[in-house]
Image (spheres, rainbow, N blue to C red):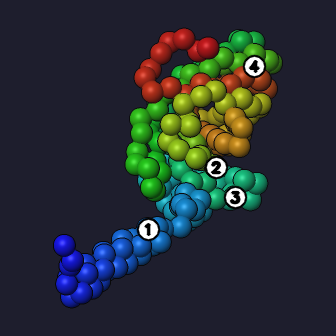
Amino acid sequence: MELPMGAVLRATMLLLVLTSLGAPLVAQEGPPPGPAPQYAPGELVSTGHSFFGTVSRGLASVIEKAVSQWGLPNGYILGQEAGGAFVAGLRYGEGTLYTRNAGDRRVFWQGPSIGFDWGGEGARTMILVYHLPSTDAVYQRFAGIDGSAYFVGGFGMTALGAGNIVLVPIRSGVGLRLGANIGYLHFTRAPTWNPF
């Protein structure tokens, strides 16, 4: 049985049209995702002023120092923490991780420290987050050296790292904690009393 030439031509044309419609869809895939959107210093200062309130006079200079050392963060955590030490210390905190493109996540942190350190404090904490590839990457241990003095209404800034990710806690609180110590913070999805 022979097909008429018109039917073969129509079938061929239909096949070509369908093939050409599918090809641009495959060829038009978007470029790979770039780096996560970052937060400008002015935006961080504004958020910090709202969060810390009237004790935030020195916040702009602390954020400027962090940005000059580590660049623009792609996330930040706002929360509160408490800690104490007498040679060995503990710190517990909770807050919310904010990112532009991955939503907000509740986070908890705890960690031990050891060193020449004594006192206790309660602090509001803003943690600048650098090079975070995904929100789940924050749930791990971040090591650092913490040496600062906390006075009523004072600010302290430290740095913690794990791989390429850098966290810069900025603390303002009440109490007195003096010294220098070595420790880490372990970030978790749920609160725990175990600092390890």
At x 68%, y 25%, the residue is 184
Cα distance, mark 3 to mark 2? Answer: 10 Å
**Residue for badge 1:** 26
Cα distance, mark 4 to mark 1? Answer: 60 Å
Q: Nearer the viewer, mark 3 or mark 1?
A: 1
Tell whether 120 sits left or right of 100: right
At x 45%, y 72%, the residue is 28
Q: Earlier in the sequence, mark 4 or mark 3?
A: 3
Tell whether 84 sits left or right of 87: left
Image location of residue 97, percent across then percent down: 47, 42
Q: What is the crowding at mark 2: few (fewer than 14 residues within 10 Å), some, or many (at least 20)?
A: many
Cα distance, mark 4 to mark 3? Answer: 30 Å
At x 57%, y 54%, the residue is 74
Q: Nearer the viewer, mark 4 or mark 2?
A: 2
Tell whether 76 sits left or right of 2: right
Pointer 4 with pointer 1, Cβ within 8 A? no
Which of the pair 15/89 is nearer the observer?
15
Q: Earlier in the sequence, mark 2 or mark 1?
A: 1
Type of amino acid under label 1:
Val
Which quadrant holds residue 145?
top right
* Numbered mark located on residue 117 in the image: 4
Q: Secondary structure at mark 4?
A: strand
Cα distance, mark 2 to mark 1? Answer: 31 Å
Q: Secondary structure at mark 1?
A: helix
* Numbered mark located on residue 131 in the image: 2
Question: Which part of the image, by quadrant, shows the C terminus?
Answer: top right
Residue reaching furthest to the bottom: 6
Type of amino acid under label 2:
His
